[in-house]
Amino acid sequence: MATILVIAARDDWPTDRVVSVLTNRGARVFRMDTADFPQQTVLAGRIDTHRGWSGGLANAHRAVELSDIEAVYFRAPHQFRLADGMSEPERRFAAAQARAGFGGVISALDARWVNHPAAMTRAEYKPIQLATARECGLAIPPTLVTNDPTAVRAFAEDVPGPIICKPVASPVFIEGNELKTVYARRLSPHDLVDLRGIDTTAHLFQAWIEKAYEVRLTIAGDRLLAAEIHAGSARGHEDWRSDYGSLTYRRTDAPSDIADGVRCLMDRLGLRFAAVDCVVSPSSAWTFLEANPCGQWDWIQGATGLPIAEAIADELQGVAT
């Protein structure tokens, strides 16, 4: 029986919403977290010259044949949870085997993917995103990636107006059991005097783009679902993620040239879902900032009513839009 495989963290409520839409439509769903493997989920996959991957996945509650999986929703699952009592070298070895074995078999499935892990891994590199967006005709901010303080000062002199600094990778990290986030920050002339610490790792700098508001453009399959984000504070205007309480939202539509550029971007990155952030200037010019292949969207649906979960379910079920 045709089944949609959902691989996501057990506590991921946006995934709960997608699964609810699918099950209400009568779809058969097998949901798991990679943390379930190998202790709670069993994989048996076979392949030979005459037949592609067959076998199945099973846990204490249900089972699914690999050949029955017609679509896979892959969204930020947890790490493999291994048995206690292993030494650290054994744990590293076992985790590598789990990634190559479980991950390899699942990644080889001929199914509709939202999104395929290999495509997500590549697309998460911001330098690749920016280069691809530029090739697809989208405007991007002048950008510098460096660990050289001299290059930062030269960049600041070269671009008109202020520059900002933001993480090249995920802005979230854990320190002392506390979740912390690094937000984009506009640099003052004083900041450019003392750039100690820049040489410790890669940093991303961009020209500050004057904006009237920002847009979160959520793409699911061929559908573009756009919401304006208006910041009600100076902190939120600099980086709206730093002050959610000040934000207001409004549905909007992407201009046709932006829609064409974003669809080109998605096609070249091999993605079927992404959360794209854009800046809209006071003169209504759109500038691409980034595309998150595993971006959050549940709060946008709640604030605007945009049918994002339904669009993801349509893509998984192959529903034409």
Image (cartoon, rainbow, N blue to C red):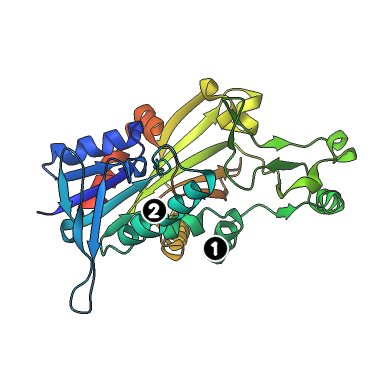
Secondary structure of residue under mark 1: helix
Residue 320 appearing in the image: no
- Depth check, front residue: 88 or 65: 88
Instruction: Please tell me which residue is depicted at 63% across the width and 48% down the height of the picture.
Output: 168
Instruction: Please tell me which residue is depicted at 23% across the width and 70% down the height of the picture.
Output: 47
| Residue that carries the numbered disc 2 in the rendered image | 98
Do labels 1 and 2 touch, CB within 8 Å?
no
Q: Residues within 10 Å of mark 2 (few under 14, many from 20)?
A: some
Mark linked to residue 33: none
First in sequence: mark 1 vs mark 2: 2
**Mark 1 to mark 2 CA distance (whole Å):** 32 Å
Residue 280 position, x and y percent, is: 56, 43
Q: Nearer the viewer, mark 1 or mark 2?
A: 2
Residue 186 appearing in the image: yes
Instruction: Please tell me which residue is depicted at 43% across the width and 60% down the height of the picture.
Output: 118
Residue 28 position, x and y percent, is: 14, 45
Whether residue 119 sits left or right of residue 196 in the image: it is left
Amino acid type indicated by mark 2: Ala
**Residue farthest to the bottom?**
49
Q: Quadrant of residue 270?
A: bottom left
- Depth check, front residue: 21 or 12: 12
Instruction: Please tell me which residue is depicted at 60% across the width and 43% down the height of the picture.
Output: 281
Q: Residues within 10 Å of mark 1 (few under 14, many from 20)?
A: many
Residue 13 position, x and y percent, is: 34, 31
Give the mark count: 2
- Quarter of the image with the N terminus is bottom left
Secondary structure of residue under mark 2: helix
Amino acid type indicated by mark 1: Thr
Whether residue 100 sits left or right of residue 246 in the image: it is left
| Residue that carries the numbered disc 1 in the rendered image | 132
Residue 31 position, x and y percent, is: 25, 42
